[in-house]
Amino acid sequence: MTALTLSTSPAATVRADAVVVGVAKGAKGVVVAPGAEAVDKAFGGKLAAVLETLGASGAEGEVTKLPAADGLKAPVVLAVGLGDAPAKGDTYDNEALRRAAGSAARALSGTKKAGFALPVEDAEAAAAVSEGALLGAYAFTAYRSSNGAGAKGKKNDDRSAPLGEVAILGGKPRDKEFKAAAERAVALADEINRARDLINMPSNDLDPKSFAAQAQAAAKEFGLKVEVLDEKALKKGGYGGLMGVGQGSEAPPRLVRIAHTHPKADKTLALVGKGITYDSGGISLKPAGHNETMKCDMSGAAAVFAAVVAAARLGLRVNITGWLALAENMPSGSATRPGDVLTMYSGKTVEVLNTDAEGRLVLADALTRASEESPDAIVDVATLTGAMVLALGNRTFGIMANDDAFRTSIHEIAEEVGEQSWPMPMPAELRKGMDSPVADIANMGERMGGGLVAGLFLKEFVGEGITWAHLDIAGPAFHEGAPWGYTPKGGTGSAVRTLVRLAERTAAGDLG
Ligand code: BES
Ligand code: MN
Ligand code: ZN
C-alpha cells in the first residue's frame, strides 16, 4: 500500500525520485501553480516557458515529465495539468487537485517516492491532494504472477508496482487540522481501495460466503459488531427475496449486519448495499456482451462495507449499521423461474417476471430488516439498472428518495466530496406498471424510466415514516475505459466518499 507523509522538506531538497508540480491554463498560456515556486526558481523562473516548449498546455490530466534543473535534489520533475487557472484571489478547486494528484500518481507507478508540490493552502486542499494521490496509485495486483513482470517474466511497464510513498510538500505538517486531514485521507483512501479490491475480485473467488468472511475479519480488526445470516437462517427468517435470488447458485446467499456504534451518538444511519457477487441474469440470462463485467454487481455492498469501516476508523460520533445483501444470481434447475412468486421478508408477495431484476429483490429484504431497527435514515447503494446508465452516463449516479430535502442534501454532499450525482424523480404513475395479476407487486414495470421504476419498487419496502434515499451507481461503479485522474480501470469505489461525508454530517448534527 502506498504510504503518505506530510513533509517538512522544501520542494527543492526533498529526497524523492520525482517532484510533482501543478500547471494550469492561464489567460496568456501555461502558468505554474502555487507550491512550485522553488522548482520554478531552479529553472530560472522559466518553468512555464520550458513546459510550453515541450507542448504542455495545463489541460486537466496532462502529464509532462522533464529532467530536474540544477539545485533540485529529485532527478525528475513531473508537471500535471490542473485545467483552467482560477481567477485572481481564488484557489484551485479541490476536485481538480484530487484528479491531478491521481494522474500524477498513476504516471509515477514503478517509482519509490514522490514529493507533491501542489497548491495546498488549507487542510482541505491537502486532503484532496492526499486522497487523489493514494487513489491514483491504486493497482489491483492480487492476480499478477509478480509485480512488474508479465506472465512469462517479461517486463511490462503498464504493470509496474504502484508508487511507494507520497510526500505532501508545502502543507503545515505540525498543524492539527492538516494532520487530521491527512489521517482522514489515508483511512478514506484505504477503504475506497478495499472496496475496489472486492469489486475487482473475480466471482470464482468472491461469493456471498467469502464476502461475509471478509466483513467478519474487518469487524474484528476495527472493533465493529458483525452478524451473518446464512442460508438456513435466511430461510427460517422468511427472507424470500434473498433466498429467491440465491437459490439457483451453488454458493448460497448471506445477509451481513456490520455496525459501528459510538457511546455518545444520538443518530443512527442505516446503509444497505446490493451485493450480487455475480449477476448472470439467472433464467432471464443476460446475452453475451452484458455479463463480462457482472462481478461488479456487489459494488453497492462493497461501498457500504467500506464506509462503515471508515466510520469506525475515524471514530465518528454516530451509529452506522451496514447491511450487505449478498447473493449470486445464476441459472440452474433450482433457480427462480420467471413467473414464480416470492414471499418477501416484509410479507409482501412479488411476481418475478424477470430474474435479471434481482437487485431490488435482495435489497427489499434488507430494507425491511434495516427498517425494523428504526434508524433516523436509510441509504441504499446499488448497481441497480442499465436504465440509469443510459440516463446519466458512466460517471454519474442517480439519487432517488422519499424526502426531497434528504435527496438534495445527498446531492450536495456528493458534490462537495467530488462525486458526480444527479437527483432523479419517482413519478407515482410508474407504479401501476408493476401491478401483478397474482401477487402484490411484480419485479418489473414499464421499460421507459426503468431506473425510476426500480426506485419505486424499493420504496415499498422501506418502513413507514423512515427517511430513505437510493443511490443507483450502475454507471460509475465499474470503469471500463482508460484510467483517468484517480479513477482506475475496474472497480472505482463509487459512493464511499459520499457515504462517509454523510456519516460525518449526521454525526455533526447537520442533517435533520
Ligand atoms: N446488475 C444489473 C444492472 C447493471 C447494468 C449494472 C449495467 C451495471 C451495469 C441489474 O441487475 C439488471 O440486470 N437490471 C435490469 C433490470 C431489468 C430486467 C428490469 C436492467 O437494467 O436491464
Ligand atoms: Mn440483473
Ligand atoms: Zn444486478
Image (cartoon, rainbow, N blue to C red):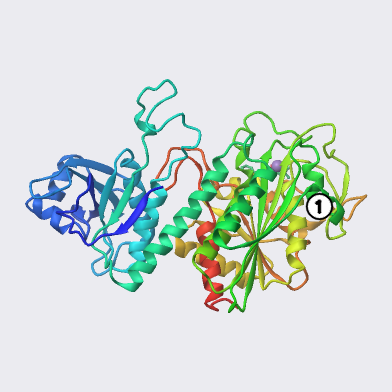
Residue 342 placement (x, y as % from top left):
87, 49
Image quadrant assignment for residue 264: bottom right
Image quadrant assignment for residue 463: bottom right
Using the image as rendered, state which of residue 4 and residue 479 is in the foreground.
4
* Lateral position of residue 146 relative to residue 45, left or right: right
Q: Is residue 99 visible?
A: no
Measured along the vertical axis of the image, is residue 40 above or below residue 247?
below
Q: Residue furthest front?
A: 220
The residue located at (61%, 79%) in the rendering is: 266
Q: Classify mark 1 as within 8 Å of ligand 3 or not, answering yes or no.
A: no
Disc tally is: 1
Measured along the vertical axis of the image, is residue 505 above or below residue 399?
below
Q: Residues within 10 Å of mark 1 (few under 14, many from 20)?
A: some
Residue 169 placement (x, y as % from top left):
24, 59
* Lateral position of residue 445 relative to residue 205, left or right: right
Using the image as rendered, state which of residue 263 and residue 243 is in the foreground.
263
The residue located at (82%, 43%) in the rendering is: 353
Residue 115 placement (x, y as % from top left):
25, 52
The residue located at (69%, 67%) in the rendering is: 402
- Which amino acid does the dot numbered 1 rest on? Leu
Q: Is residue 11 visible?
A: yes
Image quadrant assignment for residue 377: bottom right
Q: Which residue is tagged 1?
A: 234
Residue 254 placement (x, y as % from top left):
73, 49
